[in-house]
Amino acid sequence: MKTVFLLILSNIFMTLAWYLHLKFKNKPLVAAIMMSWGLAFFEYIFQVPANRIGYSTFSVTQLKVLQECITLAVFTLLAWIIFKESPSWNLLISYLLIIGAVFFAFKG
Protein backbone atom coordinates (compact mmCIF):
# COMPACT_ATOMS: atom_id res chain seq x y z
CA MET A 1 0.00 0.00 0.00
CA LYS A 2 2.91 2.35 0.70
CA THR A 3 4.03 2.00 -2.93
CA VAL A 4 0.57 2.87 -4.25
CA PHE A 5 0.26 5.89 -1.92
CA LEU A 6 3.69 7.22 -2.94
CA LEU A 7 2.89 6.68 -6.63
CA ILE A 8 -0.36 8.62 -6.23
CA LEU A 9 1.51 11.54 -4.64
CA SER A 10 4.16 11.35 -7.34
CA ASN A 11 1.57 11.40 -10.09
CA ILE A 12 -0.22 14.40 -8.61
CA PHE A 13 3.00 16.39 -8.87
CA MET A 14 3.81 14.94 -12.30
CA THR A 15 0.41 15.86 -13.70
CA LEU A 16 0.64 19.35 -12.25
CA ALA A 17 4.15 19.76 -13.69
CA TRP A 18 3.00 18.68 -17.15
CA TYR A 19 -0.30 20.56 -17.38
CA LEU A 20 -0.79 23.27 -14.74
CA HIS A 21 1.23 25.82 -16.74
CA LEU A 22 -1.52 25.71 -19.39
CA LYS A 23 -3.69 27.70 -16.97
CA PHE A 24 -1.07 30.48 -17.10
CA LYS A 25 -0.54 30.89 -20.86
CA ASN A 26 0.13 34.61 -20.41
CA LYS A 27 3.32 33.85 -18.45
CA PRO A 28 6.63 33.52 -20.31
CA LEU A 29 7.64 30.03 -21.42
CA VAL A 30 10.75 30.16 -19.23
CA ALA A 31 8.54 30.74 -16.17
CA ALA A 32 6.36 27.78 -17.15
CA ILE A 33 9.43 25.57 -17.54
CA MET A 34 10.84 26.64 -14.17
CA MET A 35 7.49 26.03 -12.46
CA SER A 36 7.25 22.59 -14.07
CA TRP A 37 10.79 21.69 -13.02
CA GLY A 38 10.02 22.76 -9.47
CA LEU A 39 6.95 20.52 -9.37
CA ALA A 40 8.82 17.65 -11.02
CA PHE A 41 11.36 17.75 -8.20
CA PHE A 42 8.59 16.75 -5.78
CA GLU A 43 7.40 14.09 -8.20
CA TYR A 44 10.79 12.39 -7.93
CA ILE A 45 10.84 12.72 -4.14
CA PHE A 46 7.85 10.35 -4.09
CA GLN A 47 8.43 8.31 -7.25
CA VAL A 48 11.94 7.05 -6.51
CA PRO A 49 11.08 5.67 -3.03
CA ALA A 50 7.82 4.23 -4.40
CA ASN A 51 9.70 2.19 -6.98
CA ARG A 52 12.43 1.15 -4.56
CA ILE A 53 9.89 -0.02 -2.00
CA GLY A 54 7.65 -1.58 -4.63
CA TYR A 55 10.47 -3.49 -6.30
CA SER A 56 10.77 -5.65 -3.20
CA THR A 57 7.27 -6.98 -3.96
CA PHE A 58 6.56 -6.26 -7.64
CA SER A 59 8.46 -6.70 -10.88
CA VAL A 60 9.57 -3.62 -12.82
CA THR A 61 6.85 -4.31 -15.39
CA GLN A 62 4.18 -4.58 -12.70
CA LEU A 63 5.36 -1.28 -11.21
CA LYS A 64 5.09 0.38 -14.63
CA VAL A 65 1.59 -0.96 -15.32
CA LEU A 66 0.47 0.16 -11.85
CA GLN A 67 2.02 3.59 -12.37
CA GLU A 68 0.27 4.07 -15.72
CA CYS A 69 -3.10 3.18 -14.22
CA ILE A 70 -2.55 5.62 -11.36
CA THR A 71 -1.41 8.28 -13.84
CA LEU A 72 -4.66 8.07 -15.79
CA ALA A 73 -6.80 8.18 -12.66
CA VAL A 74 -4.91 11.19 -11.25
CA PHE A 75 -4.91 12.94 -14.63
CA THR A 76 -8.65 12.45 -15.07
CA LEU A 77 -9.39 13.82 -11.61
CA LEU A 78 -7.11 16.85 -12.01
CA ALA A 79 -8.38 17.56 -15.56
CA TRP A 80 -11.89 17.56 -14.13
CA ILE A 81 -11.01 19.78 -11.14
CA ILE A 82 -8.57 22.22 -12.78
CA PHE A 83 -9.69 22.32 -16.43
CA LYS A 84 -13.39 21.38 -15.94
CA GLU A 85 -13.07 18.50 -18.44
CA SER A 86 -15.52 15.69 -17.78
CA PRO A 87 -14.50 12.21 -18.94
CA SER A 88 -16.61 10.87 -21.81
CA TRP A 89 -18.05 7.37 -22.01
CA ASN A 90 -15.34 6.18 -24.40
CA LEU A 91 -12.59 7.32 -22.00
CA LEU A 92 -14.28 5.50 -19.15
CA ILE A 93 -14.36 2.30 -21.24
CA SER A 94 -10.69 2.72 -22.12
CA TYR A 95 -9.91 3.08 -18.41
CA LEU A 96 -11.78 -0.15 -17.69
CA LEU A 97 -9.60 -1.87 -20.27
CA ILE A 98 -6.49 -0.47 -18.57
CA ILE A 99 -7.73 -1.75 -15.22
CA GLY A 100 -8.05 -5.13 -16.96
CA ALA A 101 -4.43 -4.81 -18.04
CA VAL A 102 -3.42 -4.21 -14.42
CA PHE A 103 -5.36 -7.30 -13.37
CA PHE A 104 -3.55 -9.46 -15.92
CA ALA A 105 -0.16 -7.92 -15.09
CA PHE A 106 -0.54 -8.93 -11.46
CA LYS A 107 -2.19 -12.29 -12.07
CA GLY A 108 0.15 -15.14 -11.10
Image: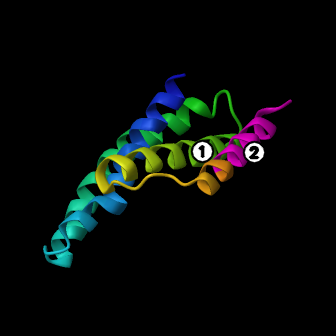
The question of residue 106 being in magenta is answered with yes
Main structural element of the magenta stretch: helix, strand or loop? helix
Furthest residue toward right: 108
The question of residue 101 being in magenta is answered with yes
* Residue displayed at 61% across by 52% down: 89
* Residue displayed at 36% across by 41% down: 45
Give the quarter of the image for residue 101: top right
* The N terminus - image quarter: top right
Q: Is there CB contact under 8 Å for labels 2 and 1?
A: yes
Amino acid of disc 2: Ala
Q: Position of residue 5 (x, y in %)?
A: 46, 29
Tell me the CA gap for discs 2 and 1: 9 Å
* Residue displayed at 75% across by 41% down: 100
**Image vertical order of residue 53 relative to residue 89, above or below:** above
User: Sequence-wise, which precedes: disc 2 or disc 1?
Assistant: 1
Instruction: Give the numbered dot on residue 69.
Output: 1
* The C terminus - image quarter: top right
Q: Position of residue 93 (x, y in %)?
A: 67, 49
Magenta segment boundaries in residue numbering: 95-108
Secondary structure category for the residue under label 2: helix
Q: Is residue 6 left or right of residue 51?
A: left
Q: Where is mark 2, residue-wise?
A: 101
* Crowdedness near tag 2: few (<14), some (14–19) or many (≥20) residues, C-alpha within 10 Å: some
Residue nearer the viewer, 27 or 53? 27
Furthest residue toward top: 1
Q: Position of residue 52 (x, y in %)?
A: 54, 35
Residue nearer the viewer, 90 or 13? 90
Q: Is residue 82 left or right of residue 106?
A: left
Q: Position of residue 50 (x, y in %)?
A: 50, 35
Secondary structure category for the residue under label 1: helix
